[in-house]
Image: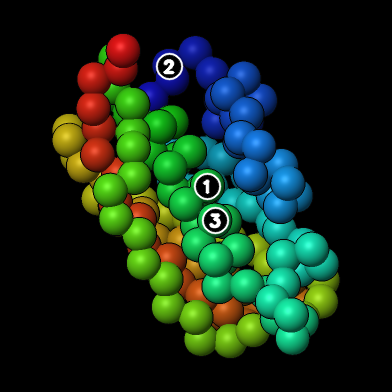
């Protein structure tokens, strides 16, 4: 973990990447205990107007991988090795909110759960789990 930067400073310095920018993902909170972001429904939908399942996965991977890198041991970088998502509801307007919490942070692997809900009523839309591997930074 960055010893000198807060979570939001870490995000500002590193950035979220071009895909997250294209999907308009915005970090709302970023601490050692959790990361929270929102993503608009508009522009991230299937042809029938529901948030695309892949968009949920991108939001989940963005939060989980960034948080894993924030917590990474010195001279290591986190890379995703597994991701899965279970979609249980849908969103058609407004924003979805992702709340990412670490399940396990170890020396070589980290696992995060990201719960994605509708901003309008808090209904869970998707649950994403991501595993990241810590490899030496080059």
Q: Which residue is mark 2?
A: 3
Determine which quarter of the picture holds residue 136: top left
Q: Which residue is mark 1?
A: 62
Residue at mark 3 to residue at mark 1: CA–CA distance: 6 Å
* Residue 127, position as x, y percentages in the image: 45, 72
Left or right: where does residue 112 sit relative to residue 52?
left
Q: Is residue 90 above or below residue 1?
A: below
Residue 129 seen in this snapshot = yes
Residue found at x 64% / y 84%: 90
* Mark found first going from the N terminus, 2 or 3: 2
Q: Nearer the viewer, residue 114 or 44?
A: 44
Q: Is residue 14 above or below residue 122?
A: above
Numbered-mark total: 3
Q: Which residue is mark 3?
A: 58
Residue at mark 1 to residue at mark 2: CA–CA distance: 21 Å
Q: Residue furthest front?
A: 47
Residue found at x 31% / y 12%: 138
* Mark found first going from the N terminus, 1 or 2: 2
Residue found at x 62% / y 29%: 15
State which mark lies toward you, 2 or 3: 3
């Amino acid at each position: 973990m960055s010893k000198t930067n807060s979570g939001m400073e870490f995000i500002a310095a590193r950035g979220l990447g071009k895909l997250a920018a294209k999907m308009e993902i915005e970090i709302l909170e970023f601490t050692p205990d959790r990361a929270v972001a929102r993503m608009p429904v508009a522009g991230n939908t299937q042809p029938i107007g529901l948030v695309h399942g892949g968009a949920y996965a991108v939001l989940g991977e963005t939060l989980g991988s960034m948080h894993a890198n924030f917590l990474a041991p010195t001279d290591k970088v986190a890379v995703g090795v597994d991701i899965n998502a279970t979609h249980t509801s849908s969103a058609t307007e407004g924003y979805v909110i992702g709340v990412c919490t670490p399940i396990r942070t170890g020396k070589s692997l980290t696992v995060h759960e990201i719960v994605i809900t509708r901003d309008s009523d808090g209904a869970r839309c998707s649950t994403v789990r991501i595993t990241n591997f810590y490899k030496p930074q080059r």
